[in-house]
Protein backbone atom coordinates (compact mmCIF):
# COMPACT_ATOMS: atom_id res chain seq x y z
CA UNK A 1 0.00 0.00 0.00
CA UNK A 2 1.27 3.46 -0.93
CA UNK A 3 0.98 5.91 1.96
CA UNK A 4 1.73 9.59 2.49
CA UNK A 5 2.18 11.48 5.74
CA UNK A 6 0.67 14.86 6.62
CA UNK A 7 1.98 16.98 9.51
CA UNK A 8 1.19 20.51 10.72
CA UNK A 9 1.83 22.85 13.60
CA UNK A 10 -0.14 26.04 14.02
CA UNK A 11 1.85 28.85 15.66
CA UNK A 12 5.29 30.43 15.72
CA UNK A 13 5.51 29.46 19.39
CA UNK A 14 5.86 25.82 18.37
CA UNK A 15 9.00 24.36 16.87
CA UNK A 16 9.93 23.06 13.43
CA UNK A 17 10.83 19.88 15.28
CA UNK A 18 7.10 19.40 15.87
CA UNK A 19 6.81 18.46 12.19
CA UNK A 20 9.71 16.03 12.51
CA UNK A 21 8.17 14.44 15.63
CA UNK A 22 4.85 13.88 13.86
CA UNK A 23 6.53 12.41 10.80
CA UNK A 24 8.69 10.10 12.89
CA UNK A 25 5.81 8.47 14.78
CA UNK A 26 3.79 8.19 11.55
CA UNK A 27 6.69 6.43 9.84
CA UNK A 28 6.87 3.96 12.71
CA UNK A 29 3.19 3.16 12.23
CA UNK A 30 3.63 2.81 8.46
CA UNK A 31 6.56 0.44 8.96
CA UNK A 32 4.50 -1.70 11.35
CA UNK A 33 1.72 -1.90 8.75
CA UNK A 34 4.21 -2.59 5.88
CA UNK A 35 3.05 0.57 4.04
CA UNK A 36 5.42 2.24 1.60
CA UNK A 37 5.69 5.96 2.46
CA UNK A 38 6.11 7.78 -0.85
CA UNK A 39 5.94 11.40 0.30
CA UNK A 40 5.50 13.72 3.27
CA UNK A 41 3.29 16.85 3.16
CA UNK A 42 3.48 19.55 5.83
CA UNK A 43 2.30 23.04 6.76
CA UNK A 44 4.46 24.89 9.29
CA UNK A 45 3.17 27.70 11.54
CA UNK A 46 -0.20 27.70 9.76
CA UNK A 47 -3.55 27.65 11.56
CA UNK A 48 -5.88 24.72 11.08
CA UNK A 49 -8.86 27.07 10.81
CA UNK A 50 -8.73 27.44 7.01
CA UNK A 51 -7.92 25.10 4.15
CA UNK A 52 -7.30 27.86 1.57
CA UNK A 53 -4.03 29.05 3.14
CA UNK A 54 -2.34 25.64 3.51
CA UNK A 55 -0.26 24.74 0.44
CA UNK A 56 0.81 21.37 1.85
CA UNK A 57 -2.77 20.14 2.25
CA UNK A 58 -3.78 21.54 -1.14
CA UNK A 59 -0.90 19.64 -2.77
CA UNK A 60 -1.97 16.47 -0.96
CA UNK A 61 -5.55 16.73 -2.22
CA UNK A 62 -4.35 17.41 -5.75
CA UNK A 63 -2.08 14.33 -5.75
CA UNK A 64 -4.85 12.21 -4.23
CA UNK A 65 -7.01 13.04 -7.22
CA UNK A 66 -4.16 11.85 -9.48
CA UNK A 67 -4.14 8.45 -7.75
CA UNK A 68 -0.58 8.72 -6.42
CA UNK A 69 -1.28 6.99 -3.09
CA UNK A 70 -3.84 4.85 -1.20
CA UNK A 71 -3.53 6.05 2.41
CA UNK A 72 -3.11 9.38 4.19
CA UNK A 73 -1.50 8.99 7.61
CA UNK A 74 -1.47 11.75 10.24
CA UNK A 75 -0.95 12.06 13.99
CA UNK A 76 -4.51 13.21 14.76
CA UNK A 77 -7.60 14.52 12.99
CA UNK A 78 -7.02 18.08 14.24
CA UNK A 79 -3.69 18.12 12.37
CA UNK A 80 -5.66 17.97 9.11
CA UNK A 81 -8.10 20.72 10.08
CA UNK A 82 -10.08 22.18 12.98
CA UNK A 83 -12.75 23.65 10.71
CA UNK A 84 -15.90 21.52 10.31
CA UNK A 85 -16.46 22.49 6.69
CA UNK A 86 -12.84 21.89 5.69
CA UNK A 87 -12.43 18.53 7.44
CA UNK A 88 -15.62 17.31 5.79
CA UNK A 89 -14.37 18.51 2.39
CA UNK A 90 -11.00 16.80 2.88
CA UNK A 91 -12.67 13.53 3.86
CA UNK A 92 -15.10 13.73 0.94
CA UNK A 93 -12.37 14.33 -1.64
CA UNK A 94 -10.19 11.52 -0.26
CA UNK A 95 -13.12 9.10 -0.33
CA UNK A 96 -13.87 10.06 -3.93
CA UNK A 97 -10.23 9.31 -4.82
CA UNK A 98 -10.43 5.90 -3.03
CA UNK A 99 -7.90 7.06 -0.44
CA UNK A 100 -8.20 5.91 3.19
CA UNK A 101 -7.57 8.37 6.04
CA UNK A 102 -5.81 6.99 9.13
CA UNK A 103 -4.62 8.83 12.25
CA UNK A 104 -2.56 7.54 15.15
CA UNK A 105 -5.06 8.91 17.69
CA UNK A 106 -8.41 7.94 16.17
CA UNK A 107 -7.45 5.05 13.86
CA UNK A 108 -9.21 4.68 10.50
CA UNK A 109 -11.44 7.71 9.99
CA UNK A 110 -15.11 7.33 9.08
CA UNK A 111 -18.18 9.54 8.88
CA UNK A 112 -18.72 9.31 12.65
CA UNK A 113 -15.25 10.72 13.38
CA UNK A 114 -15.81 13.57 10.92
CA UNK A 115 -19.12 14.53 12.54
CA UNK A 116 -18.23 14.22 16.24
CA UNK A 117 -14.50 15.02 16.28
CA UNK A 118 -14.92 17.80 13.73
CA UNK A 119 -17.50 19.47 15.99
CA UNK A 120 -15.24 19.08 19.03
CA UNK A 121 -12.26 20.63 17.23
CA UNK A 122 -14.37 23.58 16.03
CA UNK A 123 -15.69 24.17 19.56
CA UNK A 124 -12.13 24.03 20.87
CA UNK A 125 -11.12 26.87 18.56
CA UNK A 126 -14.11 29.00 19.58
CA UNK A 127 -13.57 28.37 23.28
CA UNK A 128 -9.86 29.17 22.95
CA UNK A 129 -10.64 32.49 21.22
CA UNK A 130 -13.11 33.51 23.96
CA UNK A 131 -10.68 32.70 26.76
CA UNK A 132 -7.83 34.48 24.98
CA UNK A 133 -9.85 37.67 24.52
CA UNK A 134 -11.02 37.57 28.12
CA UNK A 135 -7.44 37.32 29.32
CA UNK A 136 -6.28 40.11 27.02
CA UNK A 137 -9.05 42.43 28.19
CA UNK A 138 -7.99 41.98 31.80
CA UNK A 139 -4.39 42.84 30.95
CA UNK A 140 -5.40 45.93 28.93
CA UNK A 141 -7.59 47.25 31.76
CA UNK A 142 -4.55 46.83 34.02
CA UNK A 143 -2.50 48.99 31.63
CA UNK A 144 -0.54 46.22 29.90
CA UNK A 145 -0.21 45.59 26.17
CA UNK A 146 -3.02 43.66 24.48
CA UNK A 147 -0.70 42.37 21.77
CA UNK A 148 1.91 43.94 19.53
CA UNK A 149 4.04 46.98 20.18
CA UNK A 150 4.09 50.53 18.83
CA UNK A 151 7.02 52.48 17.48
CA UNK A 152 8.47 54.54 20.32
CA UNK A 153 8.32 51.78 22.93
CA UNK A 154 10.23 48.65 23.87
CA UNK A 155 9.17 45.57 25.79
CA UNK A 156 10.27 45.43 29.41
CA UNK A 157 10.98 42.05 31.01
CA UNK A 158 11.27 41.42 34.74
CA UNK A 159 11.93 38.14 36.51
CA UNK A 160 9.25 37.01 38.94
CA UNK A 161 9.75 35.01 42.12
CA UNK A 162 8.90 31.73 40.34
CA UNK A 163 11.59 32.33 37.71
CA UNK A 164 9.22 33.32 34.89
CA UNK A 165 9.34 36.68 33.07
CA UNK A 166 6.62 39.32 32.91
CA UNK A 167 4.82 39.96 29.62
CA UNK A 168 2.91 42.96 28.26
CA UNK A 169 4.95 45.63 30.05
CA UNK A 170 6.34 48.48 27.96
CA UNK A 171 8.57 51.49 28.45
CA UNK A 172 9.47 54.46 26.29
CA UNK A 173 12.35 53.99 23.85
CA UNK A 174 13.92 57.43 24.10
CA UNK A 175 15.70 57.28 20.71
CA UNK A 176 12.46 56.41 18.91
CA UNK A 177 10.54 58.93 21.03
CA UNK A 178 12.73 61.68 19.56
CA UNK A 179 11.57 60.63 16.08
CA UNK A 180 7.92 60.61 17.21
CA UNK A 181 8.19 64.16 18.58
CA UNK A 182 9.93 65.30 15.39
CA UNK A 183 7.09 63.91 13.24
CA UNK A 184 4.40 65.65 15.28
CA UNK A 185 6.35 68.92 15.44
CA UNK A 186 6.91 69.01 11.67
CA UNK A 187 3.27 68.17 10.98
CA UNK A 188 2.03 70.92 13.29
CA UNK A 189 4.50 73.29 11.59
CA UNK A 190 2.73 72.68 8.27
CA UNK A 191 4.77 69.94 6.59
CA UNK A 192 2.89 67.15 4.80
CA UNK A 193 3.42 63.46 5.70
CA UNK A 194 5.17 62.95 2.34
CA UNK A 195 7.59 65.77 3.08
CA UNK A 196 8.17 64.44 6.60
CA UNK A 197 9.05 60.91 5.48
CA UNK A 198 11.26 62.24 2.66
CA UNK A 199 13.32 64.09 5.30
CA UNK A 200 13.44 61.02 7.56
CA UNK A 201 14.63 58.83 4.70
CA UNK A 202 17.19 61.45 3.65
CA UNK A 203 18.56 61.46 7.23
CA UNK A 204 18.87 57.66 7.21
CA UNK A 205 16.39 57.09 10.06
CA UNK A 206 14.98 53.55 9.99
CA UNK A 207 11.21 53.05 9.76
CA UNK A 208 9.30 51.07 12.44
CA UNK A 209 9.82 47.80 10.55
CA UNK A 210 13.23 48.74 9.22
CA UNK A 211 13.93 50.04 5.76
CA UNK A 212 12.42 53.27 4.50
CA UNK A 213 9.50 55.37 5.71
CA UNK A 214 6.23 55.63 3.84
CA UNK A 215 3.70 58.46 4.07
CA UNK A 216 0.93 56.04 5.08
CA UNK A 217 3.00 54.97 8.12
CA UNK A 218 2.75 58.54 9.40
CA UNK A 219 -0.70 59.54 8.14
CA UNK A 220 -2.55 56.25 8.69
CA UNK A 221 -6.30 55.88 8.34
CA UNK A 222 -8.90 57.95 10.20
CA UNK A 223 -11.43 55.12 10.06
CA UNK A 224 -9.08 52.43 11.43
CA UNK A 225 -7.32 54.91 13.78
CA UNK A 226 -3.85 53.63 12.85
CA UNK A 227 -0.68 55.45 11.78
CA UNK A 228 1.62 57.50 13.99
CA UNK A 229 -0.51 60.68 13.89
CA UNK A 230 -3.59 58.73 15.09
CA UNK A 231 -1.96 56.65 17.85
CA UNK A 232 -3.48 57.77 21.17
CA UNK A 233 -0.86 55.83 23.11
CA UNK A 234 1.51 58.74 22.45
CA UNK A 235 -0.68 60.92 24.73
CA UNK A 236 -1.01 58.22 27.41
CA UNK A 237 -4.28 56.52 26.35
CA UNK A 238 -4.33 52.79 25.57
CA UNK A 239 -7.24 51.92 23.26
CA UNK A 240 -8.03 48.23 22.68
CA UNK A 241 -10.71 46.31 20.78
CA UNK A 242 -11.17 48.97 18.08
CA UNK A 243 -11.44 46.19 15.53
CA UNK A 244 -11.87 42.45 15.27
CA UNK A 245 -10.54 39.98 12.73
CA UNK A 246 -12.49 37.37 10.81
CA UNK A 247 -11.46 34.90 8.12
CA UNK A 248 -13.02 35.07 4.69
CA UNK A 249 -14.48 31.57 4.08
CA UNK A 250 -13.74 31.86 0.37
CA UNK A 251 -10.08 32.92 0.50
CA UNK A 252 -9.04 32.04 4.07
CA UNK A 253 -7.52 35.51 4.47
CA UNK A 254 -7.90 37.45 7.71
CA UNK A 255 -9.98 40.63 7.38
CA UNK A 256 -10.43 43.44 9.89
CA UNK A 257 -13.83 44.84 10.85
CA UNK A 258 -14.38 47.88 13.10
CA UNK A 259 -16.10 47.46 16.44
CA UNK A 260 -18.57 50.05 17.75
CA UNK A 261 -17.06 52.60 20.14
CA UNK A 262 -19.18 51.19 22.96
CA UNK A 263 -17.01 48.04 22.87
CA UNK A 264 -13.67 49.87 22.97
CA UNK A 265 -11.56 49.44 26.11
CA UNK A 266 -9.68 52.63 27.06
CA UNK A 267 -7.09 52.78 29.83
CA UNK A 268 -4.96 55.71 30.96
CA UNK A 269 -1.20 55.01 30.92
CA UNK A 270 0.42 58.38 31.70
CA UNK A 271 3.85 56.77 32.12
CA UNK A 272 3.83 56.05 28.35
CA UNK A 273 3.05 59.63 27.26
CA UNK A 274 5.43 60.96 24.56
CA UNK A 275 3.43 63.88 23.07
CA UNK A 276 1.96 66.71 25.13
CA UNK A 277 -1.77 67.39 24.96
CA UNK A 278 -1.46 70.72 23.16
CA UNK A 279 0.53 69.20 20.26
CA UNK A 280 -1.97 66.33 20.04
CA UNK A 281 -4.96 68.68 19.79
CA UNK A 282 -3.27 70.80 17.10
CA UNK A 283 -2.57 67.61 15.15
CA UNK A 284 -6.23 66.57 15.33
CA UNK A 285 -7.39 69.99 14.11
CA UNK A 286 -5.01 69.91 11.14
CA UNK A 287 -5.96 66.34 10.16
CA UNK A 288 -9.63 67.26 10.31
CA UNK A 289 -9.05 70.36 8.19
CA UNK A 290 -7.14 68.56 5.42
CA UNK A 291 -9.29 65.43 5.35
CA UNK A 292 -12.07 65.39 2.77
CA UNK A 293 -14.85 63.05 1.84
CA UNK A 294 -13.38 62.69 -1.64
CA UNK A 295 -10.09 61.59 -0.17
CA UNK A 296 -11.78 58.72 1.64
CA UNK A 297 -13.58 57.25 -1.33
CA UNK A 298 -12.18 54.02 -2.69
CA UNK A 299 -11.61 53.49 -6.37
CA UNK A 300 -14.44 51.16 -7.39
CA UNK A 301 -13.32 50.51 -10.97
CA UNK A 302 -10.13 48.49 -11.03
CA UNK A 303 -7.82 49.52 -13.84
CA UNK A 304 -6.31 47.12 -16.33
CA UNK A 305 -2.67 47.66 -15.33
CA UNK A 306 -3.07 48.15 -11.57
CA UNK A 307 -0.08 46.61 -9.78
CA UNK A 308 1.82 45.90 -13.02
CA UNK A 309 3.52 49.25 -13.72
CA UNK A 310 7.01 49.65 -12.24
CA UNK A 311 9.20 52.74 -12.21
CA UNK A 312 12.05 52.34 -14.72
CA UNK A 313 14.43 54.27 -12.43
CA UNK A 314 13.97 52.73 -8.97
CA UNK A 315 11.80 49.66 -9.70
CA UNK A 316 9.05 50.78 -7.31
CA UNK A 317 5.32 50.57 -7.98
CA UNK A 318 3.56 53.18 -10.12
CA UNK A 319 0.26 54.32 -8.58
CA UNK A 320 -2.60 56.52 -9.75
CA UNK A 321 -2.52 60.21 -8.87
CA UNK A 322 -4.23 63.29 -10.34
CA UNK A 323 -7.24 61.25 -11.44
CA UNK A 324 -5.82 59.11 -14.26
CA UNK A 325 -2.00 59.23 -14.34
CA UNK A 326 0.53 56.74 -12.95
CA UNK A 327 3.48 58.14 -10.97
CA UNK A 328 6.29 56.51 -8.99
CA UNK A 329 5.03 55.71 -5.47
CA UNK A 330 8.54 55.91 -3.99
CA UNK A 331 8.82 59.46 -5.34
CA UNK A 332 5.44 60.51 -3.94
CA UNK A 333 5.31 58.52 -0.69
CA UNK A 334 8.94 58.21 0.38
CA UNK A 335 10.90 60.83 -1.54
CA UNK A 336 13.58 58.22 -2.38
CA UNK A 337 13.30 58.41 -6.18
CA UNK A 338 13.96 61.34 -8.52
CA UNK A 339 11.60 60.15 -11.27
CA UNK A 340 9.60 63.04 -12.69
CA UNK A 341 7.82 61.17 -15.50
CA UNK A 342 4.33 59.70 -15.45
CA UNK A 343 1.96 58.07 -17.90
CA UNK A 344 -1.79 58.39 -18.29
CA UNK A 345 -3.79 55.23 -17.61
CA UNK A 346 -5.71 55.30 -20.94
CA UNK A 347 -2.49 55.82 -22.92
CA UNK A 348 -0.68 52.97 -21.13
CA UNK A 349 -3.61 50.58 -21.60
CA UNK A 350 -3.97 51.45 -25.31
CA UNK A 351 -0.24 50.99 -25.97
CA UNK A 352 -0.10 47.67 -24.15
CA UNK A 353 -3.15 46.23 -25.91
CA UNK A 354 -2.12 47.41 -29.37
CA UNK A 355 1.38 46.08 -28.81
CA UNK A 356 0.11 42.69 -27.72
CA UNK A 357 -2.15 42.44 -30.75
CA UNK A 358 0.76 43.28 -33.09
CA UNK A 359 3.02 40.75 -31.38
CA UNK A 360 0.57 37.91 -30.91
CA UNK A 361 -2.03 38.10 -33.66
CA UNK A 362 -1.10 36.89 -37.14
CA UNK A 363 2.38 35.69 -36.08
CA UNK A 364 1.76 32.09 -37.19
CA UNK A 365 5.43 31.36 -37.90
CA UNK A 366 6.47 32.18 -34.34
CA UNK A 367 3.64 30.21 -32.75
CA UNK A 368 4.35 27.21 -34.99
CA UNK A 369 8.02 27.35 -33.95
CA UNK A 370 7.02 27.30 -30.30
CA UNK A 371 4.58 24.41 -30.83
CA UNK A 372 7.26 22.35 -32.59
CA UNK A 373 9.93 23.09 -29.97
CA UNK A 374 7.53 22.37 -27.10
CA UNK A 375 6.54 18.95 -28.47
CA UNK A 376 10.18 18.05 -29.17
CA UNK A 377 11.17 18.95 -25.61
CA UNK A 378 8.28 16.91 -24.16
CA UNK A 379 9.28 13.86 -26.23
CA UNK A 380 12.89 14.27 -25.07
CA UNK A 381 11.88 14.38 -21.40
CA UNK A 382 9.58 11.35 -21.81
CA UNK A 383 12.40 9.38 -23.43
CA UNK A 384 14.76 10.24 -20.57
CA UNK A 385 12.14 9.23 -18.00
CA UNK A 386 11.47 5.93 -19.80
CA UNK A 387 15.19 5.24 -19.78
CA UNK A 388 15.41 5.91 -16.03
CA UNK A 389 12.35 3.76 -15.37
CA UNK A 390 13.78 0.88 -17.41
CA UNK A 391 16.99 1.07 -15.39
CA UNK A 392 15.05 0.95 -12.13
CA UNK A 393 13.02 -2.06 -13.33
CA UNK A 394 16.18 -3.90 -14.37
CA UNK A 395 17.83 -3.20 -11.00
CA UNK A 396 14.65 -4.35 -9.24
CA UNK A 397 14.76 -7.70 -11.07
CA UNK A 398 18.38 -8.20 -9.97
CA UNK A 399 17.46 -7.41 -6.37
CA UNK A 400 14.49 -9.80 -6.44
CA UNK A 401 16.79 -12.58 -7.72
CA UNK A 402 19.18 -11.87 -4.87
CA UNK A 403 16.31 -12.03 -2.36
CA UNK A 404 15.20 -15.35 -3.82
CA UNK A 405 18.73 -16.81 -3.55
CA UNK A 406 19.01 -15.73 0.11
CA UNK A 407 15.60 -17.24 0.93
CA UNK A 408 16.52 -20.54 -0.80
CA UNK A 409 19.77 -20.70 1.14
CA UNK A 410 18.00 -20.03 4.46
CA UNK A 411 15.27 -22.60 3.80
CA UNK A 412 17.66 -25.30 2.55
CA UNK A 413 18.00 -26.67 6.05
CA UNK A 414 21.80 -26.29 6.37
CA UNK A 415 21.46 -23.24 8.60
CA UNK A 416 21.99 -19.63 7.62
CA UNK A 417 24.91 -17.51 8.83
CA UNK A 418 24.27 -13.98 10.07
CA UNK A 419 25.87 -12.56 6.93
CA UNK A 420 23.17 -14.13 4.74
CA UNK A 421 20.39 -12.77 6.96
CA UNK A 422 22.01 -9.30 6.92
CA UNK A 423 22.25 -9.44 3.13
CA UNK A 424 18.58 -10.43 2.89
CA UNK A 425 17.62 -7.50 5.12
CA UNK A 426 19.66 -5.10 2.96
CA UNK A 427 18.14 -6.41 -0.26
CA UNK A 428 14.60 -6.11 1.12
CA UNK A 429 15.23 -2.50 2.09
CA UNK A 430 16.70 -1.71 -1.35
CA UNK A 431 13.73 -3.42 -3.01
CA UNK A 432 11.28 -1.22 -1.09
CA UNK A 433 13.17 1.91 -2.19
CA UNK A 434 13.12 0.87 -5.86
CA UNK A 435 9.39 0.10 -5.70
CA UNK A 436 8.77 3.53 -4.17
CA UNK A 437 10.77 5.16 -7.00
CA UNK A 438 8.60 3.43 -9.58
CA UNK A 439 5.48 4.70 -7.82
CA UNK A 440 6.65 8.31 -7.43
CA UNK A 441 8.17 8.58 -10.93
CA UNK A 442 5.62 7.08 -13.31
CA UNK A 443 6.07 7.40 -17.06
CA UNK A 444 4.20 10.54 -18.12
CA UNK A 445 1.55 10.22 -20.79
CA UNK A 446 2.14 11.84 -24.17
CA UNK A 447 1.59 15.61 -24.09
CA UNK A 448 1.18 17.55 -27.33
CA UNK A 449 -0.27 20.93 -28.19
CA UNK A 450 -3.74 20.60 -29.62
CA UNK A 451 -3.77 21.47 -33.36
CA UNK A 452 -6.56 24.02 -32.88
CA UNK A 453 -4.62 25.94 -30.19
CA UNK A 454 -3.14 28.59 -32.58
CA UNK A 455 -6.61 29.49 -33.89
CA UNK A 456 -8.03 29.67 -30.37
CA UNK A 457 -5.02 31.68 -29.17
CA UNK A 458 -5.38 34.29 -31.95
CA UNK A 459 -9.11 34.58 -31.39
CA UNK A 460 -8.73 35.15 -27.64
CA UNK A 461 -6.06 37.82 -28.05
CA UNK A 462 -8.09 39.57 -30.75
CA UNK A 463 -11.08 39.77 -28.40
CA UNK A 464 -9.24 41.63 -25.62
CA UNK A 465 -10.13 45.15 -26.77
CA UNK A 466 -13.81 44.22 -27.22
CA UNK A 467 -13.94 42.62 -23.79
CA UNK A 468 -12.49 45.72 -22.17
CA UNK A 469 -15.29 47.85 -23.57
CA UNK A 470 -17.90 45.56 -22.00
CA UNK A 471 -18.18 46.28 -18.26
CA UNK A 472 -19.64 42.82 -17.58
CA UNK A 473 -16.61 41.16 -19.16
CA UNK A 474 -13.95 43.65 -18.06
CA UNK A 475 -12.60 41.46 -15.24
CA UNK A 476 -12.26 38.53 -17.65
CA UNK A 477 -10.28 40.71 -20.05
CA UNK A 478 -8.03 42.02 -17.29
CA UNK A 479 -7.23 38.49 -16.15
CA UNK A 480 -6.37 37.53 -19.73
CA UNK A 481 -4.00 40.49 -20.15
CA UNK A 482 -2.40 40.20 -16.72
CA UNK A 483 -1.67 36.50 -17.26
CA UNK A 484 0.61 37.50 -20.17
CA UNK A 485 2.56 40.16 -18.24
CA UNK A 486 4.85 39.99 -15.22
CA UNK A 487 5.37 43.74 -14.99
CA UNK A 488 5.72 46.84 -17.17
CA UNK A 489 8.65 49.19 -16.75
CA UNK A 490 7.94 52.91 -17.28
CA UNK A 491 11.02 54.86 -18.43
CA UNK A 492 11.43 58.61 -19.10
CA UNK A 493 11.28 59.53 -22.78
CA UNK A 494 13.46 61.84 -24.86
CA UNK A 495 10.95 64.67 -24.66
CA UNK A 496 9.09 66.17 -21.73
CA UNK A 497 5.79 64.40 -21.13
CA UNK A 498 6.83 61.30 -23.07
CA UNK A 499 7.73 57.91 -21.58
CA UNK A 500 8.64 54.43 -22.77
CA UNK A 501 6.96 51.18 -21.73
CA UNK A 502 8.81 47.86 -21.47
CA UNK A 503 6.83 44.62 -21.05
CA UNK A 504 8.27 41.64 -19.15
CA UNK A 505 6.21 38.49 -18.72
CA UNK A 506 5.44 34.85 -19.35
CA UNK A 507 5.19 35.56 -23.06
CA UNK A 508 8.93 36.24 -23.01
CA UNK A 509 9.58 32.68 -21.85
CA UNK A 510 7.47 31.26 -24.68
CA UNK A 511 9.33 33.28 -27.30
CA UNK A 512 12.74 32.45 -25.83
CA UNK A 513 11.82 28.76 -25.80
CA UNK A 514 10.83 28.89 -29.45
CA UNK A 515 13.92 30.63 -30.79
CA UNK A 516 17.29 31.84 -29.61
CA UNK A 517 16.88 35.36 -31.01
CA UNK A 518 13.88 36.92 -32.69
CA UNK A 519 13.50 40.58 -33.60
CA UNK A 520 10.61 42.16 -35.44
CA UNK A 521 9.50 45.73 -36.15
CA UNK A 522 5.93 46.52 -37.00
CA UNK A 523 4.06 49.79 -36.65
CA UNK A 524 6.66 51.25 -34.28
CA UNK A 525 6.68 48.22 -31.96
CA UNK A 526 10.09 46.71 -31.18
CA UNK A 527 10.16 43.16 -29.80
CA UNK A 528 13.43 41.89 -28.32
CA UNK A 529 14.03 38.37 -27.00
CA UNK A 530 17.10 37.99 -24.84
CA UNK A 531 19.19 34.85 -25.16
CA UNK A 532 18.34 31.18 -24.81
CA UNK A 533 15.82 29.54 -22.49
CA UNK A 534 13.69 31.47 -20.05
CA UNK A 535 15.91 34.50 -19.52
CA UNK A 536 14.37 37.96 -18.97
CA UNK A 537 12.66 39.23 -22.11
CA UNK A 538 11.50 42.76 -22.90
CA UNK A 539 8.89 44.20 -25.24
CA UNK A 540 9.29 47.89 -25.89
CA UNK A 541 6.03 49.60 -26.76
Image (tube, rainbow, N blue to C red):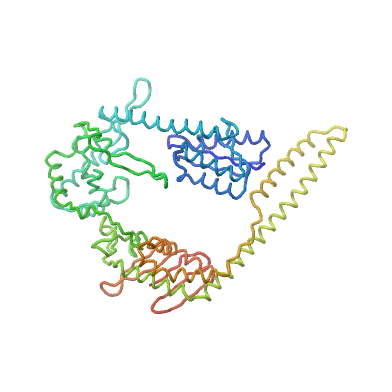
Q: Is residue 417 above or below residue 385?
A: above
Q: Which of these two is toward me, 533 or 36?
A: 36
Q: Position of residue 520 (x, y in %)?
A: 46, 77
Would you say 103 lies left or right of 161 here? right
Tell me the quarter of the picture where residue 327 sits: bottom left
Q: Is residue 183 above or below residue 541?
A: above
Q: State which quarter of the image contains the N terminus.
A: top right
Q: Which of these two is toward me, 79 or 531?
A: 79
Furthest-top residue in this view:
161
Would you say 370 lies left or right of 224 here? right
Q: State which quarter of the image contains the C terminus.
A: bottom left
| Residue depicted at 33% across the width and 27% down the height | 166
Would you say 112 lies left or right of 33 here? left
Q: Which of these two is toward me, 106 or 166?
A: 106
Q: Is residue 387 above or below residue 426?
A: below
Q: Position of residue 513 (x, y in %)?
A: 53, 67
Would you say 73 lies left or right of 489 here? right
Tell me the quarter of the picture where residue 95 sits: top right
Q: Position of residue 16 (x, y in %)?
A: 49, 38
Numbered label tally: 0
Q: Position of residue 4 (x, y in %)?
A: 60, 42
| Residue depicted at 55% across the width and 42% down the height | 92
Amino acid sequence: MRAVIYARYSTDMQRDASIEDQVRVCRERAKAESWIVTRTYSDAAISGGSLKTRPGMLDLLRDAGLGQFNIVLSEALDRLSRDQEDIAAIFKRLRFADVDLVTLTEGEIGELHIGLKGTMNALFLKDLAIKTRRGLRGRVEAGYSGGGNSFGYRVRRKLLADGTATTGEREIDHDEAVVIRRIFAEYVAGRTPRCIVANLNADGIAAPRGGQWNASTVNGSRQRRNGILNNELYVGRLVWNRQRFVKDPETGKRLSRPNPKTEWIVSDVPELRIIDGDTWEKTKVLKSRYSSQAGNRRQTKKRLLTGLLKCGICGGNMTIARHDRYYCANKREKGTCNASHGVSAPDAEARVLSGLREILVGNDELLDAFTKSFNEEVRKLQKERQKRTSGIRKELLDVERGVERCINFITSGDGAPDSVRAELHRLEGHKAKLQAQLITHPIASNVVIHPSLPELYHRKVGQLARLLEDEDLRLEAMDAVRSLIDHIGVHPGNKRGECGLTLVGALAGILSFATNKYTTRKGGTNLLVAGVGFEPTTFRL
